[in-house]
Amino acid sequence: MLFAKGNGNAAIILIAIVGSVAVIAIVTFLIYKFTHPKLKSDQKKPDEKEIVEEELNRILKPIDDDKVAKELNDYKEKEDE
C-alpha cells in the first residue's frame, strides 16, 4: 500500500486529481465556447409550417397528374383561408 502511511497524502492527491479534472473541464468549455459561433440574432428562425413543407418536398415525389395537382392546390387554398 503506497498511501497507507498517512492520510494527509491521500487528501492532497485527491485534491490534485479533482483540481486537474476541473482545469481540463474549464479549458474544454472555453475552447468550445470560442470555436463555435453563436447564431446571429438577425437571422429569421423558420416557422414550424415552413420546416414541415421543406421536409415533405424533400421526401415526397412531385405530382405528375395535372388533375391531382389542381385538386391539391385547391385544398391548400381552402386550408389557408
Image (cartoon, helix red, strand yellow):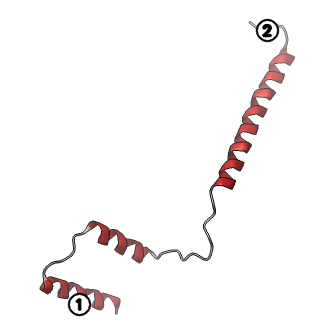
From this viewpoint, which residue is outermost toward the front?
35
- Residue 16 on image: x %, y %: 80, 27
Q: Residue at x 76, y 8 (%)?
A: 2
Q: Nearer the viewer, residue 22 or 4?
A: 22
Label 2 crowd bin: few (<14), some (14–19), many (20+), radius 10 Å: few
Residue placed under numbered mark 2 in the picture: 4
Q: Residue at x 46, y 76 (%)?
A: 47
Direction from residue 12 to residue 49 in the image, left or right: left
Quarter of the image holding residue 59?
A: bottom left
Quarter of the image holding residue 19?
A: top right
Q: Residue at x 68, y 54 (%)?
A: 33
Q: Residue at x 31, y 68 (%)?
A: 58
Placement of 52 over or under 15, stated as above or below = below
Direction from residue 78 to residue 32 in the image, left or right: right
- Placement of the C terminus among the 4 image quadrants: bottom left
Direction from residue 13 to residue 52 in the image, left or right: left
Nearest-to-viewer mark from 2 and 1 = 1
- Residue 36 on image: x %, y %: 62, 56
Label 1 crowd bin: few (<14), some (14–19), many (20+), radius 10 Å: few
Q: Nearer the viewer, residue 10 or 31?
A: 31
Direction from residue 2 to residue 39 in the image, left or right: left
- Estimate the spatial distance between the alpha carbons at disc 2 and disc 1, rounded to whole Å: 84 Å
Instruction: Answer whether labels 2 and 1 touch (C-beta < 8 Å).
Output: no
Residue placed under numbered mark 1 in the picture: 74
- Residue 52 on image: x %, y %: 37, 72
**Amino acid type for the residue under numbered disc 1:** Asp
- Placement of the N terminus among the 4 image quadrants: top right
**Amino acid type for the residue under numbered disc 2:** Ala
- Residue 64 on image: x %, y %: 15, 78
Which element type, helix, strand or loop, lies under badge 2?
A: loop
Q: Earlier in the sequence, mark 2 or mark 1?
A: 2
